Image: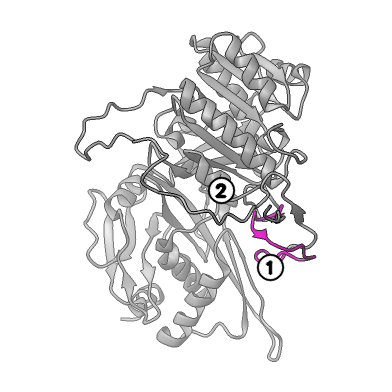
């Protein structure tokens, strides 16, 4: 008989090792390797005839007509936008976010709307009792919604219960880390248990046509806890982001097999739950009664939605010999260092004796490289103490050579800015003009600096 080999799985990143170690070699976390009892590896040496023993699968042409999947609009426009139009029958959706960010609140509001519209909806909580969920629904004014509640952690019990009556159109599992599958050994929340429980629920969704929503916990770095394969198993991955100190919440589509990625839905946390924000730009823009140096508006693009945010910069001159500080909130600190280096090397500006602070107003986080030009404009304005026009926006990517590179969807950014009353734009050369916007195009960063400082 072949010797059975054990393997150990990291509870942080899901990597597998043949031997136990105190530190995971992949993610560097300590004391996270646990024996994966549900995945014992047995050496297999027998030869198989690969041309027999299986069943034939149907092969179809790429040009075969296939019907579009049925969708269930939730009635919450921002959620439907992130999903690509609503939940798809037979799909699996994973939604993650920090504790207390509003995941359960959003899903409870969505299930209540679907149930009130005549859909069969089941909400299974593994973290709270059914009475606790019911009390939250009453606080949100959803106590009369015909949502079927249950408190359970056994996947077998849940699927057996759902299989006895009418199969629900939507099933919410809150959360997948609390679910337990009796097919393998291990405590709930371990890598093997999360993988097995999710696999059973996704198989149920595909076979019965039920849309399944799995709520996932996140680690300290913001990634969804459990094995990385969990994100590959589901059809859609949504990330619920936001700061507790700010009222807004952003629902971001990271993966979507039935729609576009990087689409966002914006919500504001209120007394009665999450309220939709149909115009996010108004939420992230500050109102200035007078021009202030170091502030410029940037039209960010999230999927197909432009969002106007204000970028603020501040520089403070230090005495000689002091080490200047660089602090950034809402943007990549490495990219800030690159912009500062380009301004010094290509444009002759000196930030070596000044502390630099950069902030994206409203707690918004930017990853769009088109923010380079807006950041550079804010830095030049702060350093020279020359206010930028309050009716101006800026966007464009900056290369290390000092070239201002064009970015995608320039006309869409200009259109959104014109809609909110902005009249001029600092942009790369070649951007098509928009009616009502005065466009200043720049091929080099030095030309922008000369323009802002009034040189020639």
Q: Nearer the viewer, residue 299 or 179?
A: 179
Q: Residue at x 62, y 21 (%)?
A: 159
Compared with residue 102, is residue 225 higher up or lower down, i.e. above or below? Answer: below
Q: Residue at x 52, y 41 (%)?
A: 233
Q: Position of residue 33 (x, y in %)?
A: 75, 57
Q: Position of residue 385 (x, y in %)?
A: 52, 72
Check contact, mark 1 vs mark 2: CB within 8 A. no
Q: Residue at x 71, y 64 (%)?
A: 24
Graded by Cα atoms within 10 Å as few (under 14), some (14 to 19) or many (20 or more), the crowding at tag 2 reads few
> Dot 2: what SS?
helix
> Dot 1: what SS?
loop
Q: Position of residue 220 (x, y in %)?
A: 71, 53
Quadrant, the C terminus: bottom left
Q: Is residue 110 left or right of residue 348?
A: right
Q: Residue at x 27, y 57 (%)?
A: 438
Q: Position of residue 406 (x, y in %)?
A: 30, 65
Q: Which residue is mark 1?
A: 25
Q: Nearer the viewer, residue 339 or 70?
A: 70
Q: Which residue is mark 2?
A: 229
Compared with residue 36, is residue 406 higher up or lower down, i.e. above or below? Answer: below
Report the Cα–Cα distance between label 1 and label 2. Answer: 18 Å
Which quarter of the figure has residue 81? top left
Q: Nearer the viewer, residue 149 or 239?
A: 149
Overall secondary structure of the magenta stretch?
loop
Does the image show residue 354? Answer: yes
Q: Is residue 51 left or right of residue 288?
A: left
* Range of residues picked out in magenta: 8-28
């Amino acid at each position: 008989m072949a010797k059975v080999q054990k393997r150990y799985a990291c509870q942080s990143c899901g990597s597998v090792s043949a031997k136990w170690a105190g530190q995971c070699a992949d993610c560097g976390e300590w004391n996270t390797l646990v024996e994966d009892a549900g995945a014992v590896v047995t050496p297999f040496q027998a030869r198989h005839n690969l041309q027999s023993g299986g069943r034939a699968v149907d092969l179809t042409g790429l040009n075969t007509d296939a019907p579009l999947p049925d969708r269930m609009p939730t009635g919450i426009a921002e959620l439907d936008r992130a999903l690509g139009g609503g939940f798809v029958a037979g799909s699996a959706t994973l939604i993650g976010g920090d504790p207390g960010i509003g995941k359960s609140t959003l899903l409870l509001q969505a299930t209540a709307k679907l149930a009130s519209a005549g859909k069969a909806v089941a909400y299974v909580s593994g973290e709270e009792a059914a009475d606790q969920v019911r009390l939250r629904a009453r606080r949100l004014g959803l106590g009369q919604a015909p949502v079927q509640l249950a408190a359970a952690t056994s996947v077998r019990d849940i699927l057996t219960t759902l299989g006895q009556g009418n199969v629900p159109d939507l099933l919410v599992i809150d959360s997948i880390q609390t679910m337990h599958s009796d097919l393998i050994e291990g405590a709930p929340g371990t890598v093997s248990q999360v993988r097995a429980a999710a696999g059973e629920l996704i198989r149920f969704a595909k076979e019965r046509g039920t849309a399944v929503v799995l709520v996932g916990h996140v680690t300290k770095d913001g990634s969804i806890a459990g094995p990385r394969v969990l994100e590959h198993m589901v059809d859609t991955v949504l990330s619920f982001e936001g700061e507790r100190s700010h009222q807004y919440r952003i629902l971001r589509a990271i993966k979507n097999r039935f729609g576009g990625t990087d689409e966002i839905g914006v919500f504001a946390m209120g007394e009665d739950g999450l309220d939709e924000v149909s115009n996010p730009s108004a939420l992230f823009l500050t109102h200035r009664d007078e021009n202030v140096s170091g502030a410029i508006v940037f039209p960010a693009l999230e999927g197909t939605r432009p969002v106007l945010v204000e970028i603020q910069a501040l520089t403070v001159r230090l005495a000689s010999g002091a080490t200047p500080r660089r602090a950034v909130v809402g943007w990549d600190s490495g990219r800030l260092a690159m912009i500062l280096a380009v301004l010094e090397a290509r444009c002759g500006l000196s930030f070596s004796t000044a502390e630099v602070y950069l902030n994206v107003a409203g707690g918004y986080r930017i990853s769009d490289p088109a923010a380079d030009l807006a950041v550079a404009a804010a830095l030049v304005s702060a350093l020279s103490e020359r206010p930028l026009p309050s009716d101006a926006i800026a966007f464009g990517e900056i290369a290390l050579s000092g070239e201002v590179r064009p970015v995608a969807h320039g006309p869409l950014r200009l259109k959104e800015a014109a809609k909110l009353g902005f009249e001029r734009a600092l942009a790369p050369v070649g951007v098509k003009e928009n009616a009502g916007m005065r466009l200043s195009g720049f091929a080099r960063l030095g030309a922008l600096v000369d323009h802002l400082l009034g040189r020639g």
